[in-house]
Image (tube, helix red, strand yellow):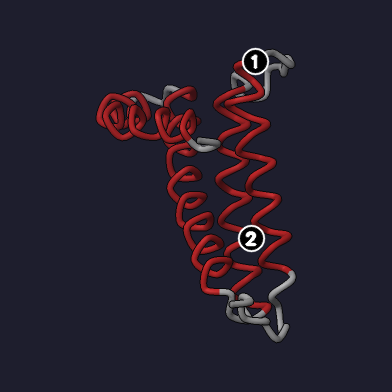
């Protein structure tokens, strides 16, 4: 649920991509921001899915793999913040902002902390 609003915007971004490419070809700066945010969203989705895979598998992860996943996830968070704040024009704490910005940020940070604990750690199996 935390990634529902960003996923909704990501889907619309894919649908609107031809229009944004046309705008970028005519040097429209807003289109370039939207395309960059769409790419950041794709990278973020890859990072979050990777973090979820590591957290669920509960296997030790190398520092390099964790760093790559953290970087991809942060690119996604940057894209979320860019789109939801009007290209960093302003931030207001209202119910929509809690759902669209704070929830994905908190969940991504939580995943990063969970996976950081698995760096070089011996993972204990679940008790039976």
Which residue occupies 60% across, 38% down? 104
Where is residue 78 shown, x and y percent of the image? 62, 40
64 up-or-down from 78: above or below = below
81 up-or-down from 92: above or below = below
Where is residue 72 shown, x and y percent of the image? 56, 56
Structural distance between the alpha carbons of marks 1 and 2: 27 Å
Where is residue 4 shown, x and y percent of the image? 46, 33
Which residue occupies 48% across, 52% down? 43
Crowding at dot 1, Cα within 10 Å, few <14 / some 14-19 / many 20+, comes out as: few
Q: Name the residue under label 2.
A: 70
Q: Nearer the viewer, residue 59 or 66?
A: 59
Q: Which mark is residue 1?
A: none
Q: Mark 1 points at which residue?
A: 95
Where is residue 50 shown, x and y percent of the image? 50, 63
Tell me which corner region of the image, top left, top right, bottom left or bottom right, holds residue 95: top right
Which residue occupies 59% across, 19% down? 86
Crowding at dot 2, Cα within 10 Å, few <14 / some 14-19 / many 20+, comes out as: many
Which residue occupies the extreme front position in the image?
Answer: 128
- Secondary element type, mark 1: helix
Q: Which of 3 and 42 is in front in this view?
A: 3
Which residue occupies 69% across, 41% down? 106
Who comes first in sequence, dot 1 or dot 2? 2
Q: Which of marks 1 and 2 is in front?
A: 1
Tell me which corner region of the image, top left, top right, bottom left or bottom right, holds residue 27: top left
Tell me whether the residue at label 1 lies in contact with that at label 2, contact meaning CB atoms closer than 8 angstroms: no
């Amino acid at each position: 649920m935390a990634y529902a609003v960003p996923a909704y915007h990501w889907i619309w971004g894919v649908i609107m991509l031809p229009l944004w490419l046309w705008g970028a070809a005519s040097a429209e700066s807003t289109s370039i921001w939207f395309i960059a945010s769409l790419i950041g969203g794709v990278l973020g989705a890859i990072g979050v899915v990777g973090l979820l895979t590591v957290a669920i598998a509960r296997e030790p992860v190398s520092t390099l793999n964790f760093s790559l996943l953290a970087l991809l996830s942060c690119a996604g968070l940057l894209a979320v913040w860019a789109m939801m704040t009007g290209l960093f024009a302003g931030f207001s704490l209202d119910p929509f902002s809690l759902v669209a910005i704070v929830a994905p940020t908190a969940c991504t940070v939580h995943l990063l902390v969970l996976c950081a604990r698995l760096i070089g750690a011996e993972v204990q199996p679940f008790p039976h």
